[in-house]
Image: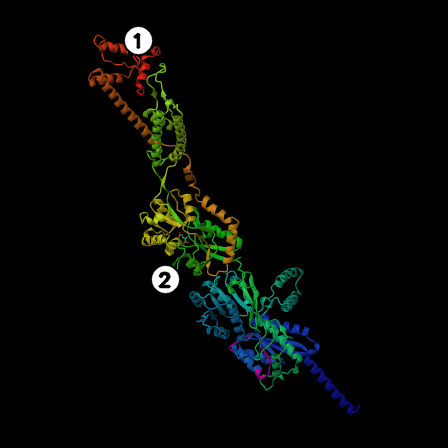
Amino acid sequence: MSLRKLISLIILQIFIVSFVNAKKSRDRIKIGGLFDETTADAENVFKYAVEIMNNMRDPSDGHLEAITKRIEYGNEYDASKKLCKLMNKGIMGLLHGPLSSNAATHVQNICDAKEMPLIETRYDPATQQPVINLYPHPSMLAQLYSDLVNSFGWESFTIIYESTAWLPIMHELLKKYDNKGFTVTVRQLDLIGNQNYRPQLRRIRLSGDKKIVLGCSADILPEVLKQAQQVGLLTDQYQFIITSLDMHTIDLEPFQHSGTSIFGARMISPDDPFVKEITDFFIEKHKSEKGSEEKASDDDDDEDEDEEENDENEDEEEEVPEGLTADKMRLDTALTFDAVLLFSQIVKFSDSVQPKSIKCDDDSERTHGISDIMAMKTVDKRRVKGLTGSIHFDQKGHRSEFLAEIIELASDGIQKVGVWNSTDSEIYLIKAHDSLSGFGDELSLRNKSFLVLTALSAPYGMLKETPDTMIGNERFEGFGIELIQKLSEKLGFSYTFKLQEDGAYGSYNKETGEWNGMLREIMDGRADLAITDLTITSEREGATDFTMPFMNLGISILFEKAKKEPPQLFSFLSPFSGEVWVWLIGALAFVSCSLFVMGRLSPAEWDNPYPCIEEPEVLENQFSMRNSVWFSIGALLQQGSEIAPKAPSTRIVASTWWFFTLIIVSSYTANLAAFLTIESLSTPIEDVEDLANANGAIPYGAKKGGSTFSFFKESENPIYKKMYEFMNSHPEHMTSSNDEGLERAKAGRYAFLMESSSIEYLIERNCEVTQVGGDLDQKGYGIAMRKNSPYRGALSEAVLQMQESGDITALKIKWWKEKRGGGACDDAGSDSGAEELDVANVAGVYVVLISGCTFAIIVSLLESLFDIRNRAKELEVPFIEEFLNEAKFIIKCRGNVKPVRRKLSAGSLNEEESRSVSRSSESPKREIIGPYGFNGPCLKNLTKLDLMADHDDDDKV
Ligand code: GLU
């Protein structure tokens, strides 16, 4: 072989070797990563990402190789030493996990000096910004959160931040709002540094600000939320915006049922198919790595053990680190993948693929490092889409043109509610939210837990009557308690009852400007709902929200029942008014006179007194004045008389009078029955006007601080105003509960102003009291909750549904009529039925009878005396003798025959004889001389008694 040929061969070999070496070097593009034990997920993702890139890359573009080093967190010396080792191995780019600020600065300085492309995946305000940072710049985040605050319409809010590192984000927010005059309060979370955030959180609660922007890292977020919950900031009246982009990675389950609106943002979209594909690969890769590790360690085990191990493997399979899943991946982990992706794209087009071992202690540096970095900044976003969306940088090198998902902590976990686009700085809310925008869906009450305030007021909220000791919700029963129970079944919330010990419902004190009672508890967030006989008023509506009314009512009067008046002696006169009686007597007199006059005018009424005499010398008329009156009275009393009118005129008068008396007597009888059985009730007041006009003679009051009292206080009506003044100046008549009012009303002469539904309940059980007068107004009871509560709509709808379905009516019947002695006074209503009359009811009639009889006796005595006097004159004997004779006869009470005493002539029977003759019961008939002086045949058969009877009739002419 010639020397020339040998030289050619050597040159060719050198060329081939150097070509092969060059090719080999280009095939292996090393990328370095610095991680510590806290960033195991990022380290895994770094390796998996390199593998994915290699699978995707054209082999001619070279093979990426991941070289990682674990460093001790916070140890800057260790970090720089490991970095030098990596550079010594010829890495062409570096990325790292979380480092302490000093270590990060150190690493950055070294990379700058050696022209080593460093891709940062996190934001550390304490370090100088690296040339390439995939983490969104604070100004971008400030824009995001201020857009969020804008779209929620917050006007005033509190910013609370963990450390000054968060201020750039907050500062932007503050700058944005302070010019507009909105109140923005800024507080630092932990002033002392002992991880006790409660003092500051408590201050926020006391400030009353319900809208909070919380700037803290995901590491302390669970603790902050826990302490916020402890001080009462995590209730449904608060809204939070959490500025950590890793909010979705922590366990929020303990807070998701609190009802608090917690919002945040994330840059990873778990629903994105690309993200799904990549994270699925991570999980598979992790599982297969785990599997092969275990397989290697199981090689020597026997079969039985294998079985056990397989079971364990199955369990372990489920234990994929959450940080590798799309739902729980941290932003720096995702950015690690994106950094590898970005690096892979750059080296593909870079000329600087020649690896070079760089030593920290000499002047060596990476060739074209700066140009590669510049290339990264101008990367074509259309070609690089990572786990956090498209990767693009603006002029200043800040991450730009990306999307962030707006998320909310709902009762079933994190939910995407909107999207923010960094390009047009716009929030697109997918789900309109009532608590944010004021429109849209109501919050679901499912799985929410409410503290429900109630007060002891029958039958709305009552303590159970049982000898057993009850705790919790079991202590209570009543209409309101059951209503809440039914609503909870309907809407799926749970509840705990709390008792309002002082029984105050809520009234506004204009002097102090403070609310009290149950409403105050609601407003201060110490309770979520309040139910009892809580009236919806416009004043209360201004401070809290109410559901639709579940019961309607009005103010009325509770008063003792009217007492029965004692029956009147002359109650039989009651059917007719005094006027009618006077007219009746007038009619009687008029008809009697008519009969008398018409009887005298009518020839038919003039009769022959002795029919045996065909041509009498005189005629007789039966309608003397006395007989006319007697006839009229007989007809009026439905008894008739022996007098019968004969002439047409008198018959017409008689018929008309009979008809008149028929109607009058029927009306009297009908009315008498009612008057005798229904005794009139006497009540001193009929309505509220009587009460006001009584000027305190009947004291009255209402429940202190109740809506009834407020009604009178606010009213412009002069009567109600007067009543308010009375009540206001007589606090001793005001009560602290309806029960107290009831007791006072029962005691008598006290009117309690209260609501008709409660009156209805009380008069079912307390028969001594009743409702007096109608309702003064119309209003309703509602369930109170905080102002702008998102649950109002759902609760109102459920209340309406229960009304429509009759559930509320059924509840009312149960608690008003059935439970706790309902219906006890139902019998009292049967007062209107027939009742037996007692002596008092008919005493007047007896009085009339006795008076009539007494009068008759007096008249008969007078008659008798008159007759004795006449006879004494006629017989010419002293009055006293004749009187004694007559008295003797009467007192004997024997015999129905009385002799006629006559004046004795000489030679006639002496007095004794005469008496003996006359007292004989079988005395012979005397010769009787007729009125015309002869003994006619018609008189033959007349006995002495007949004649005596005829003789009595002095009407005969
Ligand atoms: N329902 C009333 C209220 O809500 C209490 C009773 C009353 O004032 O009559 O205040």
Residue 777 drawn at (x, y percent): 42, 52
| Labels 1, 2: front one | 1
User: In the depicted view, which residue is nearer to us: 879 or 189?
Assistant: 879
Q: CA distance from mark 1 to mark 2?
A: 118 Å
User: In the depicted view, which residue is nearer to us: 503 or 877?
Assistant: 877
Tag 1 secondary structure: loop
Residue 752 drawn at (x, y percent): 37, 48
Establish if 409 lies above or below 28. above
Give the prevailing secondary structure in the magenta stretch: loop
Quarter of the C terminus within the rendering: top left
Is 119 inside the magenta-drawn segment? yes
Image quarter of residue 885: top left
Residue 424 drawn at (x, y percent): 57, 73
Three-letter amino acid code of the residue under disc 2: Thr
Residue 381 drawn at (x, y percent): 63, 76
Which residue bears the numbered disc 2? 512
How is this picture coloured? Answer: rainbow
Q: Which span is picked out in magenta?
A: 112-126
Which residue bears the numbered disc 1? 924
Mark 1 vs mark 2: which is more N-terminal? 2
User: In the depicted view, which residue is nearer to us: 40 or 169?
Assistant: 169
